[in-house]
Image (cartoon, rainbow, N blue to C red):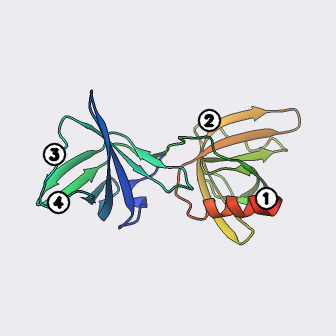
Amino acid sequence: MGIKLSELEEGCQIRLLISNKDNSMTLGAWIKNIVKDSVAIIALDYPPGKRLVFDNVNVDLEYGQEEDVPILWKSVRIANYKGEYVLQTTEDGRRHNRRGCFRIGVGVKAALCSVGRGPGKVMIRDVSLSGYSITDRKKELDFKVGEKVEVYFEDLGHVLNLMGNVVRIEEHEDMNIYGLEITNICKDLSSYISVKQRHKS
């Protein structure tokens, strides 16, 4: 499960990564209106009066800020309709880790909110802008690779709700560690990591 286009806010800045066999370019844009989960009306950072046609090129959509991991939607479609640019995603967006993400130790208990599981507590081992890991000392969670896990916790004045897919399982004698890739937008995450880092130093 990735990130829906509709999770972005209207008015937010995006980038279009446009390419063909020979050339590539980046074009700034912003979201005017979210129509549904996979469709939005966008405006381009381009001189008015000139209409661009996006036939025979590949367009990826990137959203993100400097301090956060960008989210990438691959091979989006852009069409002209009644004077507007209509963008449609063909698949969910994914966190696009262009560089290594700093991981910060957490050591805080979180509420487990996953569908199909009763209420429970898990220990958040560490977190980064692109993922988090869970420590299971009792070896009773039994998560599987690909399973969706949602956790909720509060720490240092931040309220964090993280959804993730299990991508790694480490089995040790005294514990199991589950590594998860974050699949939702958590606005407080970047601030939390910065504050946590200062708190530990």
Please identify the quarter of the rendering in which residue 35 is found.
bottom left
| Cα gap from disc 4 to disc 2, whole angstroms | 42 Å
| SS of the residue under disc 2 | loop
Which residue corresponds to mark 3? 53
Q: Residues within 10 Å of mark 4 (few under 14, many from 20)?
A: some
Of the image marks 2 and 3, the number of the one nearer the N terminus: 3
Q: Which residue is mark 2?
A: 145
Confirm or deny contact between disc 2 and disc 3 (CB under 8 A): no
Name the residue beneath numbered marker 4: 84
Residue found 80% across the figure and 63% down from its top: 199
For this orientation, the residue located farthest to the front is 47
Where is residue 29? Give x, y as percent: 31, 57
Contact between marks 1 and 2 (CB within 8 A): the answer is no
Q: Secondary structure at mark 1?
A: strand
| Cα distance between the residues tagged 1 and 2 | 23 Å
Q: CA distance from mark 3 to mark 1?
A: 50 Å
Decide which of 160, 85 is in the foreground and name it: 85
Circle count: 4
Under mark 3, the amino acid is Val
